[in-house]
């Protein structure tokens, strides 16, 4: 297992490689809540924090190394943009059912795409098989030391932007984000309190942390779809997340929706469901944290316009 100190050092090295390519996103003070800040990765290139990890990974490889990944969402788009930056030959494996708008977005970067029968899980397995058979380097969305280090660069910026950080709220998916950011913050100040926030409908990492091992959980549809899904059996993130997270919070779909609307109407911030999830976690703890400095990490802003319109009009 990597120590959090090793992750923090790797994040420093990764930041040296990627700082000229990523957007140093702002820590914006809340308009309505004293002591609250938003780390706005919704304004990151490709609209998601994933661009940091993808660029960190690809910049650690010689550009003669062909790479492959599988994702029809933020990770696939981030890897495609990163490949343009680093000059890598990238192949993205996608399920045949991928939304045409996402396929078009990924193809717009000039990368190779393969449409594979079945769901996203089968697409990922096919990408891993091709990596083994054809000599590609597979790029995981979270289960990779360089990906984790890239996400940790958010913590480096946060520490430079704020003189005090008492609490940080981070949405939980595969755990790459909380592992990287949490490690950087804990090494700088062990008293920083890290809240890991899960959607009740898909909370595999939280369940695994509680069990002390990877466990299977039921996955239902969630507005925080960027955080949905299971965790790899050999995930590097489980021990790191368990070490860095102080408190686990689970939020309902109603709470995530309320947070999404509050960010739009009260803070003028448009985010995706996975980012609203972190704010939903904060709202459940806000009274307890009065007088302290809290940061909600808004992990992305890529939400379907029609879905957002429907939510905002109905609530």
Image (cartoon, grey):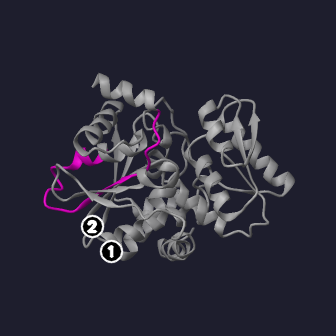
Question: Residue at coordinates 48% horizontally, 29% vertically from top-left?
Answer: 221
The answer to whether residue 235 is above or below residue 64 is above
- Give the left or right position of residue 76, taking residue 92 as reference: left
Residue lying at the far top in this picture: please name it: 314
Q: Secondary structure at mark 1?
A: loop
Which quadrant would the N terminus be assigned to in this image?
bottom right
Chain part drawn in magenta: 281-304
The residue labelled by disc 2 is 165
Report x, y in % for residue 161: 32, 70
**Nearer the observer, 281 or 77:** 77
Q: Quadrant of residue 167?
A: bottom left
Q: Nearer the viewer, mark 1 or mark 2?
A: 2
The number of numbered discs placed on residues in the rendered structure image is 2
Q: Quadrant of residue 29?
A: bottom left
Residue 184 image position (x, y, % from top left): 42, 70
Task: Using the image, determine if residue 45 lies above or below residue 187.
Answer: above
Q: Is residue 279 left or right of residue 24?
A: left
Asked if residue 160 lies left or right of residue 236, the reply is left
Q: Is residue 236 visible?
A: no
Number of the label disc, if any, that sits on residue 189: 1
> How dense is the environment of label 1, judged by Cα within 10 Å: few (below 14), some, or many (20 and up)?
some
* Quarter placement of the C terminus: top left
Measure how far apart labels 1 and 2 are at the Cα level.
9 Å
Residue 293 located within the stretch drawn in magenta: yes
Q: Mark 1 near mark 2, Cβ–Cβ under 8 Å?
A: yes
Tell me the tag on residue 181.
none
Which residue does the image show at 31% across and 24% down from the upper left? 313
Residue 69 position in % (x across, y down): 69, 50
**Who's the residue at 81% across and 48% down the image?**
130
User: Tag 2's secondary structure?
Assistant: loop
- As for residue 292 lying within the magenta part, the answer is yes
């Amino acid at each position: 297992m990597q120590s959090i100190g090793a992750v923090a050092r790797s994040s420093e090295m990764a930041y040296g490689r990627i700082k000229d390519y990523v957007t140093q996103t702002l820590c914006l003070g809340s308009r309505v809540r004293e002591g609250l800040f938003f780390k706005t990765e919704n304004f990151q290139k490709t609209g998601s924090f994933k661009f940091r990890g993808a660029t960190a990974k690809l910049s650690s490889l010689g550009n003669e190394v062909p790479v492959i990944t599988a994702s029809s969402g933020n990770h696939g788009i981030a890897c495609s943009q990163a490949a343009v930056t680093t000059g890598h030959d990238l192949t993205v494996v996608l399920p045949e059912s991928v939304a045409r708008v996402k396929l078009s977005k990924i193809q717009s970067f000039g990368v190779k795409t393969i449409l594979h029968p079945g769901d996203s899980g089968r697409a990922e397995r096919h990408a891993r098989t091709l990596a083994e058979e054809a000599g590609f380097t597979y790029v995981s969305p979270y289960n990779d030391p360089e990906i984790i280090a890239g996400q940790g660069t958010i913590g480096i910026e946060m520490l430079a932007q704020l003189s005090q950080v008492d609490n940080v709220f981070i949405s939980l998916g595969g755990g790459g984000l909380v592992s990287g950011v949490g490690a950087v913050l804990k090494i700088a100040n062990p008293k920083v309190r890290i809240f890991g926030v899960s959607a009740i409908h898909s909370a595999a990492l939280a369940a695994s942390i509680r069990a002390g091992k990877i466990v299977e959980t039921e996955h239902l549809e969630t507005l925080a779809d960027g955080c949905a899904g299971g965790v790899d059996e050999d995930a590097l993130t489980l021990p790191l997340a368990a070490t860095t997270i102080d408190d686990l919070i689970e939020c309902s779909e109603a709470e995530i929706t309320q947070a999404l609307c509050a960010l739009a109407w009260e803070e003028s911030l448009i985010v995706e469901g996975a980012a609203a999830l972190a704010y939903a976690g904060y709202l459940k703890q806000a009274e307890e944290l009065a007088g302290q400095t809290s940061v909600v990490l808004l992990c992305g802003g890529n939400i379907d316009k029609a879905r957002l319109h429907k939510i905002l009009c109905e609530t």
